[in-house]
Amino acid sequence: MEGSTTRVGNNEEHRGCLVIDVATELSRTEPPVTTQYSCIYRVPPHIRKVNDEAYTPKVISIGPFHFGIERMQFMERHKLRYLKSFLERAHQKSFQDWLAYVKNLNPSVRSYYANIIKLNDDHLAKLILIDAGFILEILLRYYFNDKWTAEDETLLKPWLSTTVRVDLLLLENQLPFVVLQKIFTEAFPSGQNDNGFPSLLQLSFKYFAYYNNQGLGASADVSIHHFTDMLRIFHLPARLPDRADKDDKSEIHLHTATELVEAGLKLRADNPKKCLFDLRYSKGVLKIPSFKVDGHTEILFRNLLALEQCHYPYEAFVTDYIRILEFLIDTGKDVDLLIKNGIMANWLGDNNAVADLFNSLWKNITQVNFNTEYLNLYKDLKVFHNDPVNSWRASLTRDYCRTPCQTAATFAAILLLVLTTAQTVFSILSEV
């Protein structure tokens, strides 16, 4: 009886300790990350595992997600140099004043990241100030082409300069643009009213001009969340097509470029300065804006896809485009067709490697809906491919009309066959 009482007491004591432990954990729990402002994401594991390196910076880390990686420590010295130069431009505040200013921004900074940041406020403010100072200073130097020193020779080497620029476009390697804007405005308050002084958007557009194929202007109505988002805007059409209902895309399966050409379709390159997504079909001709595939193509497309998966699942225009290319390109033979028609420039060298690239981009990607223009394109191409007249005409052209001499010989043979048949018919009729 006494042992039973002891066990009951122990159980109640255990429950009491458990309640205290849970209450303690609850008190330490941070509020959930709000989705209202979140725009910078960790790439979902099922997407990242396909090619982890595509989402990881090579030489410079920006923001809290990749802070402290050993191989990027050599760039920390350059960051501090650029921060020092930036503070000299914005000479009205000391470093401590700037640190206090950025620390006041911490609550909003945390809200823009979709994952919890474990750095304390002092460390986070220091990180944001150093990274923002580096970014703003490099943008200013590229815009005004000033303050370059002998120490910049390393950073300005083409391979490193290009890698830094690509690293600054990775989804996990971002600072919120609104935070950069606040620091920029605080540093140059009078510059905002000076027509000769560029806006932060103008600085950003100039630095990343290589990716702005459409030549979009940095107008006041352009709103971006961060540099990855800006890269997406560079690719979007001026007028966004409507999105189709989810059920409308359930059975979409486009034929490969080889299959379509064998059915008689003509592929033509369109102006590379047009929107990359502006695929047009008319009267047996598919026009595709020409594009280049190089060593950074996969990285940039993967980060744009990841951004749309996380932030724009119902406006996934990059995803739509990659889906179309993934259908058109199945093997190196399809790549060869695109190259021969001036649509693709292959800087990777191996056509099969390009085919593998586009086939792998689609792995583990979820498509919620499809834009209506691509849906109509798919339907038109399906009708064209399934029309036996087109296949017969293409077969005739491919097998018997490849050269002018072969065409003449083919038509001569057809004419001879027709005349012979006619003579035979007339002979039979005359005997009747």
Image (cartoon, helix red, strand yellow):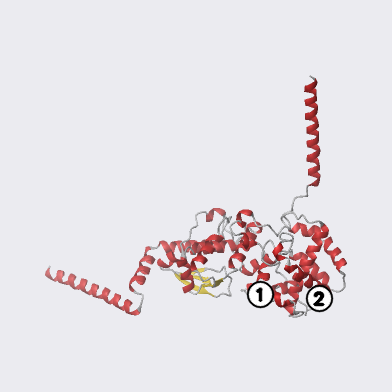
Quadrant of the rendered structure where residue 197 is?
bottom right
Label 1 and label 2: CA atoms lie apart by 22 Å
Query: To which residue does mark 2 refer?
Result: 191
Residue shown at 81%/60% (left/top)?
123
Question: Image check: 414 left or right of 326?
Answer: left
- Helix, strand or loop under label 2: helix
Near mark 2 (Cα within 10 A), the count class, few <14, some 14-19 or many ≥20, is some
Q: Residue at x 27, y 77 (%)?
A: 412
Give the number of marks.
Answer: 2
Q: Percent from the top left, x then y, of residue 39?
A: 70, 59
Horizontal and vertical percent position of residue 195: 78, 79
Visible in this render: residue 263? no
Q: Quadrant of residue 58?
A: bottom right
- Horizontally, residue 105 falls left or right of residue 336, namely right
Is residue 186 visible from the viewing direction of this image?
yes
Nearest the eye: 367 or 249: 367
The quadrant of the rendering that contains the N terminus is: top right
**Residue named by callout 1:** 209
The vertical placement of 169 against 114, above or below, is below
Quick check: 395 left or right of 17? left
Q: Position of residue 253 (x, y in %)?
A: 48, 58
On the image, the x and y values in percent for residue 89 come to: 82, 75
Of residues 335 and 270, the one nearer the viewer is: 335
Name the residue: 56% across, 72% down: 292
Residue most extreme to the left: 431
- Mark found first going from the N terminus, 1 or 2: 2
The label on residue 237 is none
Q: Amino acid at mark 1?
A: Ala
The C terminus sits in image quarter: bottom left
Nearest the camera: 28 or 108?
Answer: 28
Amino acid of disc 2:
Gly
State whether residue 14 is above or below residue 37: above
